[in-house]
Image: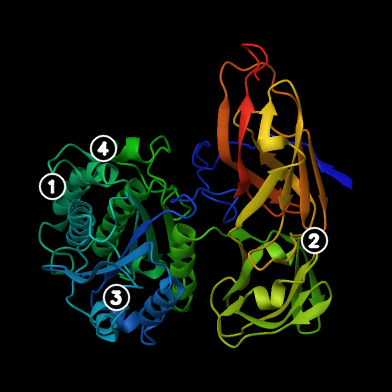
Amino acid sequence: MTLLCSAVAFPPSAHAAGVDDSYGKQVGGQGYKPCLPRSDVDLLVLMDQSASLQSLDPKDRRVDALELIAEMLGSEADIRLAIVGFSEGAPVVHRRLRSLVDKPLDPSVLADATDKSGQQTDYRLGLDAAIGEFDRADRADDGNNGSDPCRVLVFFTDGIYDPVKGHPGEGEEPFAAAFRETVCGETPYLDGFLIDDLRQLEIQTYAVLLQVGFISTSDDANRIRHDQLMADISLDILRAITGHNADLVADVPKAEECQEWSDGTWPQRGKISAVANIDDLINELLEVVRDATTVLYGCPREETSLSGAGETWEFVNQPAGAFVESLLIDRWGMEVREIIANGDPLPLPAGRISLGPEVLQGLPPGWRLAVEVAPESSYSGDPRIKCFIEPVELPQFSGDFDGVAGNQLVDTMGYDLLVDWESADGDPYPCGFDRFELSLPTGLDPVKVDCDSGKLEVGWPPPGEIDDDLPFARLSGQMIPSYGMQAGWEGMPFEVILQRPATVMSTKHGPRL
């Protein structure tokens, strides 16, 4: 057998890390995730239904996005989806928080949620309704079996806060300033002020904005001044409720009442995404939903080379395909002509690009991904692709201590645990780890991890004299497979279930018969 690694302590999770105002340079290891892996999630999509979106979205990209979100979450019993629409007047809860397994998305909901319902864009009404739906579900414990879900609000709008009819509406500017105060300050709003309500329910907010709606198109100086003021107030509010000082809002003045919510010192860790092109809406919304509901890692790009009329984007080496659940490639103004893994072409799906285990399973540790692309001439934004890798969820592994009668471990001796390192289908997982951690109840990490053909031999030193016996039947650990660290992977949790319950026996009171 070959010694692969010694135990190395894992760094603090992203949830305990300091705040990076650039958010996540990559999805996954380097960026904050709103929900812990395998959490129950309540996801609410808050849709702007003002009339302006009808002209900006003639191809109904919003419908496509909601359909793909429903497809993505359709088999997830622990994720509940709600859809709320707003413009002016009373907002509409088109779908209450329910799992798509229990209640699939009705086509009539899609139609109603993307139809225009008014001329104005009143954030206050939409946010009020969204918080109310989260609160209703929390109070009713609606199908959540007593667990406290991770709550994520995805807020999509094409424009500035515009609550009063007219261009500009009478009294709109002081009205907007007062709303900002109800968001950030101490003006009563529901049970407190709006940010307090978001904090009490631990709602993380993601704002997806159609950037053109925040730029004045008027030639009139007074109208330009008004539009700029309303845009600044709108973006200041969105920065406060997301906690993200994105490029779009970095130069926007911070109102005194909102400053403490915009400086990266509190647990509101959402995101602002600016969409330059309505055709990019699907990618942005799906990325936000994935970020909230799925463990995903970005594929760091290593180099780009010219190839004929296009380019070849090459990415860093990746862990073995046995550890990959899916490979996703999103495109912004790019035609993907070929996907290559270790020099061999992979199937190229029509439409959205998602490859699963049937394609990736046999890829060896350190395989390299390359994608041949060509920019689309009609695209007005920055042509690019993004690659994402979803890791598998490791099964429970079976283990037993080698040659130990009754699995009774003496605290003054070291022991080896034999683990069946195999998938749920019985296929051996590849050997090799960047990091490996599996602790005994005494807190000791292993001093050796040998691997050979689906078998692990994990060895611990003697823990030394302990006060009392420590019985146990399972061990919890984490590991990063080879090439995972350079690709930005974090620890993959796993459990070893002992074939026989074990006990670390105390020698403090002398030998026992």
Q: Is residue 217 above or below residue 107?
A: above
Q: Is residue 218 left or right of residue 478?
A: left
Q: Earlier in the sequence, mark 4 or mark 3?
A: 3
Mark 2: which secondary structure?
Answer: loop
Mark 4: which secondary structure?
Answer: helix
- In the depicted view, which residue is nearer to us: 171 or 1? 1
Q: CA distance from mark 4 to mark 2?
A: 52 Å
Q: Is residue 220 left or right of residue 253?
A: left
For image coordinates 50% across by 48% down, the residue present is 32
Residue at the limit of the structure toward the front, as seen here: 513
Spot occupied by residue 389 in the image (x, y as percentages of width and height): 63, 64
Q: Is residue 385 above or below residue 197?
A: below
3 and 2 marks in contact (CB < 8 Å): no
Q: Earlier in the sequence, mark 3 or mark 2?
A: 3
Q: CA distance from mark 3 to mark 1?
A: 30 Å
- In the depicted view, which residue is nearer to us: 295 or 488? 295
Residue holding disc 2: 365
Q: Earlier in the sequence, mark 1 or mark 4?
A: 1
Q: Nearer the viewer, mark 4 or mark 2?
A: 2
Q: CA distance from mark 3 to mark 2?
A: 40 Å
Spot occupied by residue 411 in the image (x, y as percentages of width and height): 68, 22
Q: Is residue 26 above or below residue 263?
A: below
Q: Earlier in the sequence, mark 2 or mark 1?
A: 1
- In the depicted view, which residue is nearer to us: 411 or 447? 411
Residue holding disc 4: 257
Q: Nearer the viewer, mark 1 or mark 4?
A: 1
Q: Nearer the viewer, mark 2 or mark 1?
A: 2
For image coordinates 13% across by 64% down, the residue present is 164
Q: Nearer the viewer, mark 4 or mark 3?
A: 3
